[in-house]
Image (cartoon, coloured by chain):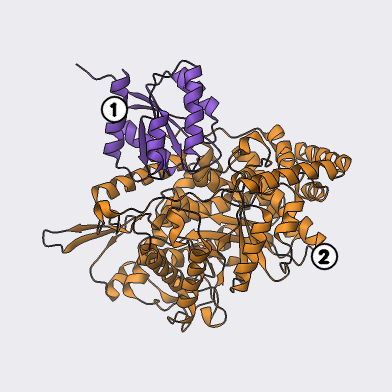
Amino acid sequence: MVERKIKILVGKPGLDGHDRGAKIVALALRDAGMEVVYTGLHQSVDQIVRIAVQEAVDVVGLSIMSGAHIPIGQKLLVLMKQEGLEDIPVVVGGVIPKQDIPKLKEMGIQGVFPGGTPFDEIVAGIKNVAKKAA
Amino acid sequence: MGVAKYIKDEKDAIQEVIYQSGIQVKPVYTPKDLEEVGFEYEKDLGDPGEYPFTRSLHPQGYRTRAWTTRQYTGFGTPEETNQRFKLMISHGQTGLNVAFDLPTQMGYDSDDPKALGEVGRVGMAVDSLRDFETAFNGIPLDRIGSGLTINAVASIMLAMYQAMAEKFGYAKEKISATPQNDILKEMIGRGAWVFPVEPAVRLVGDAIEYSVKELPRCNPVSVCGYHIRESGANPVQEIACAFEIARAYIENVMERGLKAEDFVGRFSFNLNVFGNLWEQIAKFRAARKLWAKMLKEDYGVQDKKKLFLRGLFGGGGSGLTKEQPENNIIRGAFYALGAALSGAQTTALCSFDEAYTIPTPRAALLSLRTLGIIMDEVGLRDTVDPLAGSYFIETLTKQMEDKIMEEMKQIEQKGGMVHAVASGYIQRKVSQQAYEYEKGLQKGEYIKVGVNKYTDGDKDQTDVELHEYNEQWVDKQIYSLKELRRTRDNNEASRTLKELEKATRDGKNVMPFLVDCCRAYATVGEMAGVFREIFGEWQEPSIF
């Protein structure tokens, strides 16, 4: 059986413009056979949720370098729930201190990939959460 | 970011060395190599201080004058920034380099909903002239120059700097500010853009034109190959992009009837120092030459001093690692050595803790001391351009020069930098390069100590540290902004903003109108709001 192509949104919330990480991860996910929707910079959480709905993505990924991963993650999860999207798994990458990983997981973020995580691990992690959600 | 690709045999002997620019390095260089690349002393180097300035801008290099150091400073409120400025000056720093928070960089006031959680986080929050009056209080503005690290709203900050200086009694002719004011590189790399490409470039041109006419000691644009390299470009692309960006600004200003000769002397550059030592040195030497040639041949600039590639060669942020952070102290010293061997006129060095947090004062001071040791202890002031004549360095400099020219030609074939950015051509190229590098790093093709070689395994516990974010600063900043709006002459503020709106729509130079707005204590958000209303915001092209 052919595996269905995973469609993932890569979002850059907030004012921070450091998008090197988001872009290279987007390229790596595409090379791994996923369909990637990259939002571009300066998106609000509302805009990201709207794109997730419009594009009917399987996974939502956020790249956050500003240190605001916890409040932004929380806000996204609440909004997704309001939109009835709670089944779509959310993953986060960027500048994330190790001590915050358990907190993010507890909140309901299904995958956390701090800067420097090998592409293979990111791809495997996303495939894994997409499979669980399917 | 690493250095070069090393292909080794089974006994660990190096078979091939390939630099990031794609240049293959030979194990031995001889006079024959110089012959092969057609090296001629007069044409390719010239004496130091002579065209094409490959060796140095000044006849005796650092003998006459050591480099200027400009560490990047500024966070939290204007009060804290003022204290940090005074500390750095008391430690011998000769110029300031101001960091702004993201809301300010993006033209939002501190109480804008979009600013939530970002006020004072990565730099100083500036809402109005009042904040500048606090931040620069007691700084001798006729002696100390200030780099203003801001782009999308650089025109606003330059106007505010003038208004502030005049308030403190300094004539506008006496002050020296260098707003970064390079929006095209924000669109390629750093991401703090607001307006679409063409009006954004117009604002850059307005600040340049105004400075030429009104602010004789200001350098109205600092073209940043730096951030393009941080975004993943190789050293050749870094220089080629920087020069093609500069070309776009030059042509914008020339369309206003100015001659290149009248303003190119005010351009400065911000270029990066990390990577392979030799490749960086060759890059800077080739860049000095190419810039002088471009100005002379393409724009007919005659005055020798206006052909100088001036600016800051420094930083090196992407070379640093979060893993084993003390290693970054050593890396910094080598980056500084490279900058000195390249004849850097101004420099700054990223702090060793910068890979995982906002620099502590101790780390920032250590960077400044590293620069001092390089300049005063090691022997870098002894003689100018000490590597000149090396078979290897001169061959490499010629090769870099050819590669940079080739890359510049490609951008010109895409219709120039404005088009290449609007279409996303450059961004895709740089992202692809960053991606290839990252793959190489993960496969171990590039070596990074502490990351993929000599690692501590699981013992490495270095974690990113989030800079302590003081909510009280934010409250204070927002409180004083609200007070300002209550106590200023609001009629005057709206009058000047209306004038700004009209001038913007009429295609006039906005600078004098911005100065009036600043004097009337109009806020950054109000002034940028006028531009947002008229220009709209940029939509990024696709990265795929």
Q: Which residue is mark 1?
A: A127
Residue B198, horizontal then vertical, whole percent: 62, 39
Judge left or right: residue B85 versus residue B290: right
What residue do we see at 39% from left, 69% from top?
Answer: B334
Please tell me whether mark 2 sits on a helix, a strand or a loop.
loop
Q: CA distance from mark 2 to mark 1?
A: 64 Å
* Residue B248 percent location from the top left of the image: 58, 49
Give me the chain letter of mark 1.
A
Q: Residue at x 57, y 82 (%)?
A: B64
Residue B107: quarter of image: top right
Q: Which mark is residue B514?
A: none
The amino acid type of the residue labelled 1 equals Lys
- Residue B416 visible, this angle: no
The hue used for chain B is: orange
Front-most of residues A68 and B319: A68
- Closer to the camera, A98 or B414? A98
The residue lying at 42 percent from left, 76 percent from top is B41
* Rendered-image quadrant of the N terminus of chain B: bottom left
Q: Quadrant of residue B338?
A: bottom left
x%, y% of residue A30? Answer: 33, 31
| Mark 1 burial class by Cα count in 10 Å: few <14, some 14-19, many 20+ | some
**Which of these two is toward me, B23 or A122?**
A122
Disc 1 element: helix
- Name the disc covering residue B169, or none: 2
The chain coloured purple is A
Q: Quadrant of the C terminus of chain B?
A: top left
Q: Amino acid at mark 2?
A: Gly
Q: Closer to the camera: disc 2 or disc 1?
A: 1
Residue shown at 39% from the left, 53% from the top: B234
**Relative depth, front residue between B224 and A80:** A80
For the residues bearing labels 2 and 1, Cβ distance under 8 angstroms? no
Residue found at the very far left of the displayed protein: B10
